[in-house]
Image (tube, grey):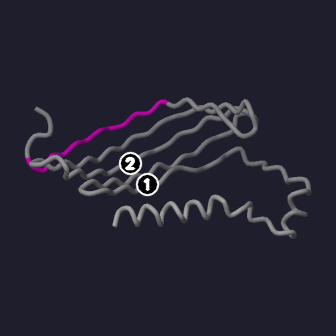
Amino acid sequence: MKKTFLLILFSFTAIFAFNGNGYSNDNLAQLNSPASPDNSKWYFGGNIGVNFWNDYFLISAEPMAGYKVTSKFSLGAKLNYSFRKDNNSAPQNFTYNNYGGSIFARYNPVPRGYLHAEFNFINYKPDCLGGLPFT
């Protein structure tokens, strides 16, 4: 069952990855026209994740906001939260609620790449559901 699921997942990933660029002839004319400048110095993003396997479950969220100081240098901040439940450690079961934040700096030396430095603070809260987690 797991092999079938992974095979289907890989197939869909390969189909979407090699589906071409998705541009029609109408869109090609727009690609060759000069792009309108983006005047916003703010950018937003982040991550949302879910992971589960056997008796392990993880859900996480990490919103991010950044400010372009110059065209090649930016500063920003992130918040993060994750919930993890691990039932693999018999006879103890662990639940973790981790939260925190970070600040970062980015430098773009080339158009499609950047260097990223980040200071991250995480509040690590383990809860044991069957005894003391650490002795």
Q: Is residue 88 above or below residue 75?
A: below
Q: Which residue is mark 2?
A: 81
Residue 38 is marked as: none
Secondary structure predominantly adopted by residues drawn in magenta: strand
Residue in the foreground of this view, choosing between 21 and 116: 21
Which quadrant would residue 65 be assigned to in this image? top right
In percent of width and height, residue 114 lies at 66, 34
Q: Is residue 111 left or right of residue 82?
A: right
Say which element carries label 1.
strand
Task: Tell me the crowding category of disc 1: few under 14, some 14 to 19, or many 20 or more residues within 10 angstroms, Cα based.
Answer: few
Q: Tell which circle, 1 or 2, labels the residue nearer the N-terminal end.
A: 1
- Span highlighted in magenta in the image: 119-130
In percent of width and height, residue 87 lies at 19, 52
Q: Amino acid at mark 2?
A: Tyr
Say which element carries label 2.
strand
Q: Amino acid at mark 1?
A: Gly
Q: Is residue 109 above or below residue 100?
A: above
Q: CA distance from mark 1 to mark 2?
A: 10 Å
Q: Is residue 14 above or below residue 95?
A: below
Which quadrant would residue 31 be assigned to in this image? bottom right
In percent of width and height, residue 81 lies at 38, 48
Q: Is residue 29 left or right of residue 116?
A: right
Q: Residue at the spot x=25%, y=42% of the render?
A: 125
Residue 49 is marked as: 1
